[in-house]
């Protein structure tokens, strides 16, 4: 899409320009008031001059508004030309007729996990669905903990990790160790007390030495090295780090130590937040990303392709007849692949629950429908399509990917 029209809209935006004009008008009126109080005899002349300037300001604002409206109209026409399509051509209302409750529940959970509690309550009330109490409490807790992490306060996050230690250990997660590491370094960067940092290590990190001994050793070594060169607090040394907030500066290692030690002492709060959300959602049996986000993003990728196919079918006066299957392959990112897919090498159709993959005695796999056709409903032996072996339908077994 050509963004020249949008750039023109940005250039003619009237917000800041109108504020400047209003400030100019305010200054003019205040100056006129002062002049009239100091020289009452020429007050009428001053007021007349002020009225002229005021009219000029309003004329300028009208011109700005006219330019902005013109740009907006042109941009709207560009959008209409670019997105001139009818989504009804590719919509499948019948697929969702009996899924209204599931869709509403998914939207409600999306609002809850985004922290939009008031919107979620109103939506559940208007949609006529019950609020899932466990999920509401869980996502309320999640958003409270995330607010703490963004403010570098890990108390609630550590408490949650401690309560779920058994689950995290079975899963092989290092979340609790990462939380304590961030807490240790955050306190050290704020007060510069290496002895307090070592005491924290002895108190909270010793229980992680079986899995993270080398990391703990490197961490303690980096702390001692950092303390030797720290004549001032690390927070004072980081004053030269441009582009960082004061809170971020307090959570970064000093600049005057070797890069190898800086890597050990560096904190990545956004990465910690991502890991916490992933483990929290996994404990609830949910995905890291909201299902609504996934569906909308996948639909945005598929939409242009499906619209193009729809237009081609209209021109050729054809229709897509296969059910539960798209007319073309949609290439989605690898993180959007949630299920294994098997395509039968004989029929070239994807396997389904009704037509699952079947492995023959020779080890090759085809769909059940293809197996039925080759064996003539199981009445005779048949040759494998890919090797010389003879097979029969009864010896074939279903394959689960």
Image (cartoon, rainbow, N blue to C red):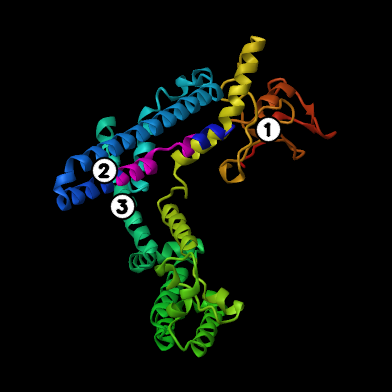
Kindly identify which residue carries mark 3. 140
Principal secondary structure, stretch drawn in magenta:
helix
| Relative vertical location of residue 400 with respect to residue 139 in this rendering, above or below | above
Of discs 2 and 3, which sits in the foreground?
2
Kindly identify which residue carries mark 2. 118
Instruction: Count residues near mark 3 (Cα–Cα under 10 Å), then give few for <14, some for 14-19, many for 20+.
Output: some
Q: Is residue 259 left or right of residue 266?
A: right
- Which sits earlier in the primary sequence, circle 2 or circle 3? 2
Image quadrant assignment for residue 46: top left
- Residue at 45% x, 76% y: name it: 185
- Residue at 53% x, 17% y: name it: 89
Residue 110 visible in this rendered orientation of the protein: no
Give the quarter of the figure containing the C terminus: top right
Q: Kindly report the distance in space between the C-alpha atoms of the residues bearing marks 2 and 3.
A: 12 Å
Instruction: Count residues near mark 2 (Cα–Cα under 10 Å), then give few for <14, some for 14-19, many for 20+.
Output: few
x%, y% of residue 284? Answer: 40, 51
Furthest toward the right, the residue is: 388
- Which sits earlier in the primary sequence, circle 2 or circle 1? 2
x%, y% of residue 190? Answer: 39, 78
Image quadrant assignment for residue 359: top right
x%, y% of residue 373? Answer: 71, 21
| Relative vertical location of residue 208 with respect to residue 24 in this rendering, above or below | below
Furthest toward the front, the residue is: 41
Q: Secondary structure at mark 1?
A: loop
- Which sits earlier in the primary sequence, circle 1 or circle 3? 3
Q: Kindly report the distance in space between the C-alpha atoms of the residues bearing marks 2 and 1.
A: 46 Å
Q: Is residue 97 left or right of residue 321?
A: left
Kindly identify which residue carries mark 1. 343
x%, y% of residue 276? Answer: 44, 59
């Amino acid at each position: 899409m050509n963004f020249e029209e949008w750039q023109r809209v940005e250039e003619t935006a009237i917000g800041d320009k109108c504020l400047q004009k209003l400030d100019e008008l305010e200054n003019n009126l205040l100056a006129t008031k002062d002049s009239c109080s100091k020289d009452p005899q020429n007050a009428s002349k001053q007021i007349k001059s002020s009225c002229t300037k005021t009219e000029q300001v309003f004329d300028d604002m009208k011109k700005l508004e006219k330019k902005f409206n013109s740009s907006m109209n042109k941009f709207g026409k560009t959008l209409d030309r670019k997105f001139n399509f009818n989504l009804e051509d590719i919509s499948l209302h019948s697929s969702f007729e009996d899924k209204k409750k599931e869709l509403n529940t998914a939207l409600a959970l999306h609002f809850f996990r985004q922290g939009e509690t008031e919107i979620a309550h109103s939506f559940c009330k208007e949609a006529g669905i019950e609020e899932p109490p466990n999920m509401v409490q869980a996502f309320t807790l999640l958003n409270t903990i995330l607010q703490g992490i963004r403010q570098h306060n890990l108390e609630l996050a550590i408490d949650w990790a401690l309560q779920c230690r058994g689950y995290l250990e079975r899963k092989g997660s290092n979340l609790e160790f990462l939380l304590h590491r961030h807490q240790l370094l955050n306190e050290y960067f704020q007060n510069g007390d290496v002895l307090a940092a070592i005491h924290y290590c002895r108190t909270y990190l010793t229980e992680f030495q079986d899995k993270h001994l080398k990391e703990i050793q490197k961490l303690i070594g980096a702390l001692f090295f950092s303390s030797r060169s720290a004549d001032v607090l690390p927070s004072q040394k980081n004053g030269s780090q441009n582009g960082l907030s004061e809170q971020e500066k307090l959570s970064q290692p000093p600049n005057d130590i070797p890069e190898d030690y800086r890597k050990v002492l560096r904190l990545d709060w956004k990465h910690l937040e991502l890991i916490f959300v992933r483990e929290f959602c996994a404990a609830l049996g949910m995905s890291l990303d909201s299902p609504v986000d996934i569906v909308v993003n996948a639909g945005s990728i598929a939409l242009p392709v499906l619209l193009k196919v729809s237009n081609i079918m209209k021109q050729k006066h054809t229709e897509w007849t296969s059910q539960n299957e798209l007319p073309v392959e949609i290439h989605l990112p690898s993180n959007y692949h949630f299920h294994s897919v098997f395509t039968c090498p004989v029929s070239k159709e994807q396997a389904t629950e009704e037509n699952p993959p079947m492995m023959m005695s020779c080890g090759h796999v085809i769909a059940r429908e293809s197996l039925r056709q080759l064996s003539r409903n199981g009445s005779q032996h048949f040759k494998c399509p890919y090797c010389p072996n003879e097979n029969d339908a009864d010896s074939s077994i279903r394959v689960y990917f």
